[in-house]
Amino acid sequence: MEETQVKTEEMTLTKPSEAREERRGRFDRGADKRSNRRAPRREARAKPEYDHKIVSLRRVTRVVAGGRRFSFSVALVAGNRRGLVGVGVGKATDTPLAIDKAMRDAKKNMITVNMTKSLSIPHEVEAKYAASVVKIRPAPGKGLVAGSSVRTVLELAGLKNVGAKLYSRSKNNANNALVAIKALKKLSTTKIKD
């Protein structure tokens, strides 16, 4: 009888440590599995060539014999913040398609802005498009002072020390962006030193 007691005591003494080792072994195997996992299926997105901001998004209704047809109209500003900027308009039955069309249109209508070394403009310019009137002038040391979608155009063009004022009461953001582009086109192409 004494022998059996000893055996049972030995088993109870060794079993917990064996169990711990076994558990550790299982845990380690799991860690190995985790380290050998496959990379995520989705690849990291490449940074787009141009930054863009949506200036206006409207739902447009067309009345036909069977009822109403809805589509979406998008106006967006695209630029690389280094002198290239453009405004595009797109229309489609769903928003992502309309945004893609507007982006293609913006790329097609890109302009190069003539900037000084201090990221300002060489001289004052004024333009009118539809009912929108804007005046853009250099503002050394003041940063970007502009409102509405004119600010978006100037930001995405990469301009910093510029002031802009809308003299019309037009709240049409698409036209305000287009008038800013028209004004920036008027900048002289001759290089001016600061």
Image: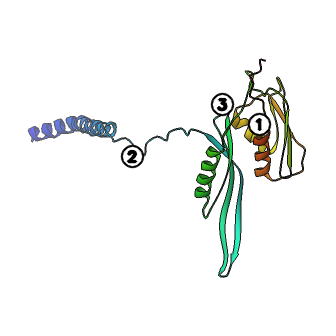
Identify the mark nearer the N-term, 2 or 1. 2
Q: Which residue is mark 3?
A: 82
Circle nearer the N terminus (2, 3): 2
Q: Nearer the viewer, mark 2 or mark 3?
A: 3
- Mark 2 vs mark 3, CA separation in Å: 34 Å
Dot label at residue 26: none
Q: Quadrant of the N terminus?
A: top left
Disc 2 to disc 1, how far (Cα)?
A: 44 Å
Q: Is residue 98 left or right of residue 181?
A: left
Residue topped by disc 2: 41
Say which amino acid is labelled 1. Leu
Q: Nearer the viewer, residue 77 or 109?
A: 109
- Which x, y percent locates residue 132? 85, 49
The three-letter amino acid code for the residue at tag 2 is Arg
Does the residue at mark 2 contact the one at mark 1 (Cβ under 8 Å)?
no
Gap in angstroms between the C-alphas marked 3 and 1: 14 Å
Give the quadrant of the C terminus.
Answer: top right
| Mark 3 or 1, closer to the camera | 1
Does residue 36 lie above or below 101 as drawn? above
Relative height, residue 122 to residue 29 (above, below): above
Instruction: Provide the residue designation for mark 1.
Output: 184
In this picture, is 70 found above or below 122? Answer: below
x and y, in percent, of residue 10 in the image: 17, 35
